[in-house]
Image (tube, rainbow, N blue to C red):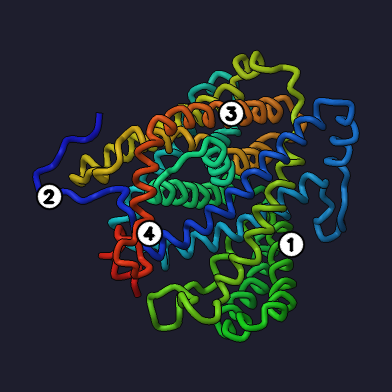
Amino acid sequence: MGPPEPARGAHRVVLGPGSYREHLRIGEILRQETVGGFLLLAATVVALVLANTGAAGWYFGLRDTELGYEPWHLRLTVGEWAADGLLAVFFFMVGLELKREFVAGDLRQPAKAVVPIAAAAGGVAVPALIYVGVNLAAGLDGLRGWAIPTATDIAFALAVLAVIGSHLPGALRIFLLTLAVVDDLIAIVIIAFFYSTDVSLGLLGWALLPLAAFALLVQTVRPFLASHPWVALTVLLPLALATWALVHASGVHATVAGVLLGFTVPVLRRGQDEPEPPTAGRPGLAEIFEHRIRPFSSGFAVPVFALFSAGVVLSGGMAQVISNPVALGVVLGLVLGKPLGILLTTWLLTTVTRARLDTDLRWVDLAGLGVLSGIGFTVSLLVNDLSFDPGTDSNTAAKLGILTASLLAAAAASAILLTRNHQYRVLEERERRDTDRDGIPDAFDDDDEGQA
């Protein structure tokens, strides 16, 4: 049951269409992430096949092969290189996207930001509490995985939407992406504070030097770097690698370095509140990074991580998921905790603020997104490997729980969202209608920001 209807004129709209500029930008991001989602699914299938056939010995041997220079604290297994190295690229894009959302996107407006931020927080807290409740009797070892069911995998979720042919309207897609972005921010904080061990403040201090040099360059000579992308790569990449290596050696998880580097990239034009680059003309540094790095991140880095992290022996099957508190806590946290936390937080917030959903949407739409958010694949696998040593019973059980939860969440979300697909198709057609042929759909004609 939705929140009570406030008096006429006293409420504001939640899950409205947003600005046209944001609609276009996020639409482009989601198209790229959808392709990455299919590659992620393919990599997961390959990993499961290799782990459960005669190639298992070769697969696990390759994953555990050590490479790198020990004096620099870089003697890592192939699986660790994928998790600590390649995922740093993914988290660089997360940091850049977070900055764009909060500095130049719709989230810079508190009225638009409060609901998705609160919903994301609820979608993190409730799954964690459910996991802890299930594992209290299992002892301290099981409780170490409390953060595993808190994540949302936007690429996997978008691949599911593409498979079922959902015509999810722009407002819901923006809300889903915003949930995932804020979810990633919370995951970063959790990893930095709860999964960093034996932190060396000296090495962390040294990491600030290449990070500061990187920030100084992208801020002060960004027009030159934007017009000479290969020079930018030659100059900035060594600084980024040095920052990553020193953060890794310090004991703070190396993916945090990717986020910090992403935060330094400017997204506004100097002295203005408009995103850099302008809509027309030469692209700016933030856009260049997005266009050049996002395909590598979603098309290579994340799938390769999944290839080496998702491989788990399935001999235990559902019996192991049900009997093991770690696996059961992950499944219940993702499949039930995620939608419950998102729905409950949004309902409470709209009740307190006398807000209401957009008239074209229903609470069942939000429920479908909440269930879809229970696909916590990539970051959940990362947190699992930080919580439990690879190859241990708890690590294997958590992987089974993540896989099971992702499949259940995908199936349940598909069933919910497909019941509304006709209405979504109508809304999608309305979003594209441009009767006055001014290049801006009629739904956004009152959006001054989108027309700027």
**Crowdedness near tag 1: few (<14), some (14–19) or many (≥20) residues, C-alpha within 10 Å:** many
In the image, is residue 364 above or below residue 102? above
Q: Earlier in the sequence, mark 3 or mark 2?
A: 2
Element on which disc 4 rests: helix
Q: Nearer the viewer, mark 3 or mark 4?
A: 3
- Separation (CA) of disc 2 from disc 1: 53 Å
Between discs 3 and 4, the one toward the N terminus: 4
Q: Are marks 1 and 3 in contact (CB under 8 Å)?
A: no
Label 1 vs label 3, nearer the camera = 3
Q: Is residue 252 visible?
A: no
Q: Amino acid at mark 2?
A: Ala
Instruction: Name the quadrant containing residue 147.
Output: top right
Taking depth in this image into account, of 92 and 53 the one nearest to the observer is 53
Q: Is residue 296 left or right of residue 261?
A: right
Name the residue beneath numbered marker 2.
Answer: 10
Which mark is nearer the camera, 2 or 1? 2
Secondary element under disc 2, as helix, strand or loop, is loop
| Between discs 1 and 4, the one toward the N terminus | 4
Q: Secondary structure at mark 1?
A: helix
Residue 35 coordinates in the image, percent (x, y): 62, 49
Image point 61% across, 60% down: which residue? Answer: 92
Q: Residues within 10 Å of mark 2 (few under 14, many from 20)?
A: few
In the rendered view of the protein, which quadrant contains the C terminus? bottom left
User: Real-space Cα distance between discs 2 and 4?
Assistant: 22 Å
Look at the numbered disc 3 and give the secondary structure of its residue: helix
Q: Which residue is mark 1?
A: 245
Q: Amino acid at mark 4?
A: Leu
* 247 sits to left or right of 172: right
Would you say the residues marked 2 and 4 are in contact, meaning their CB atoms lie under 8 Å apart? no
Residue 281: horizontal and vertical position, in percent?
51, 81
Q: Judge whether 265 appears above or below 328 on screen.
A: below
